[in-house]
Image (tube, rainbow, N blue to C red):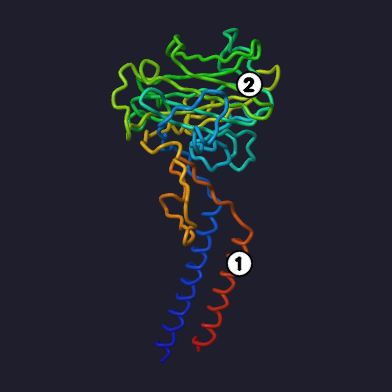
Amino acid sequence: MRKHKFHGKTALRLFGFIMTLAVLSSVLTVYSAAVDYPVRSFEKSQALYFENPPVFDGVINDDEWGEPTLVLIDNGSVPSSFSMRVGDTGVLADPSNTPDEMCLIWLRWDEEYFYVGVEYPDAKPFHQYADGSGDFWNGDVIQFGTDFGGNFEMQGNPQTNSWGPEYKLHLFAECSNDGQDYAFSYHYTDYSELKYVIDNNGKTTTYETAIPWESYIAENPEGIKDGKVIGFAFTILFANDNTDYYGWLGWGDNICYNQLDESRVGNNQIKLVAEPAVKPMVIETEPAAETKQISPENAASPATAAETTSPQTGDSVMAILLITAALFGIIVFRKKYAG
């Protein structure tokens, strides 16, 4: 009888220990999932198709451009996003910090052009060098790189040197000296075929740009169709009145080079898709019989970065209650059956 009783107590202790570990493990897993930020890595996004090109008037609206491809903000929710803050030169921002800047990005395409639209809050843009009097990259400016051969992973390159032989860099800015819009590149000097308008309404700065595929992105741009994937990275720099740039925000890297090698994510993959950028308006002639259910396919745009769930106070309370309940149940079980 002693032998049987001894094994019963041992089994009971083991059962209690396993139950405690199981509860703790499940609670900690749920809680850690709420506070983890995505692993820094390159991303895959989509450029929707322009059935009708927009009017370049310095205004981006849903009727012409559709919904933005990306809300760019460095709060840890966008895996390939990095920023530089005042006083933090060369240091990656802590993803838990409240970001200083943000912008919206639209990526679009048709058979002739690759389109990039940008909006960001700005009372007054400033750039004193865009007319050629200094470094074009230094001021309120957008810079984005394209690689017709795909991103670094597709070409077998390391992420610290992610651009291939068809890499092109495109820069756009409004010069504060004369109020004119300018384009610049280190890879071509004829800007006459580019389309671009930069405008500020006192609250928001808007960039509308269109880059011809031929010559400006690739010498022989074959295969521009649904499913084509190009490499892409984007950086926007910020400046105040009468100052050089004070910070930047990037999506993908190898444009701003003061990131550490071990922090690089490489350039992103942009897939050209035939889905129209602007959805046709549907007018219902009869009231809907029931509320339409949101399916996984239309729950969120595949080109929009997923949001990171923030930890909630309720998660902590629930964890404590679950642990307490488990321990109480184990104690009662032992008292009832240990003897």
Residue 14 in percent (x, y) is at 45, 75
User: Which residue corresponds to the image point at 45% horizontal and 38% vertical from the top-left?
Assistant: 41
307 or 38, nearer to the observer = 307
Image marks 2 and 1: residues in contact by CB distance under 8 Å: no
Residue 313 in percent (x, y) is at 64, 59
Rendered position, 74 above or below 327: above
- Residue labelled with disc 2: 245
Q: Amino acid at mark 2?
A: Tyr
Instruction: Point out the frontmost of discs 2 and 1.
Output: 2
Q: CA distance from mark 2 to mark 1?
A: 48 Å
Residue 224 placement, left or right of 60: left
Residue 323 placement, left or right of 270: right
User: Which residue corresponds to the image point at 36% horizontal and 20% vertical from the top-left?
Assistant: 166
The mark found on residue 320 in the picture is 1
Residue 311 placement, left or right of 110: right
The mark found on residue 153 in the picture is none
Looking at the rendered structure, the number of numbered marks drawn on it comes to 2
Q: Looking at the image, which residue sits at the far bottom?
A: 1
336 or 251, nearer to the observer = 251
Residue 114 placement, left or right of 72: left
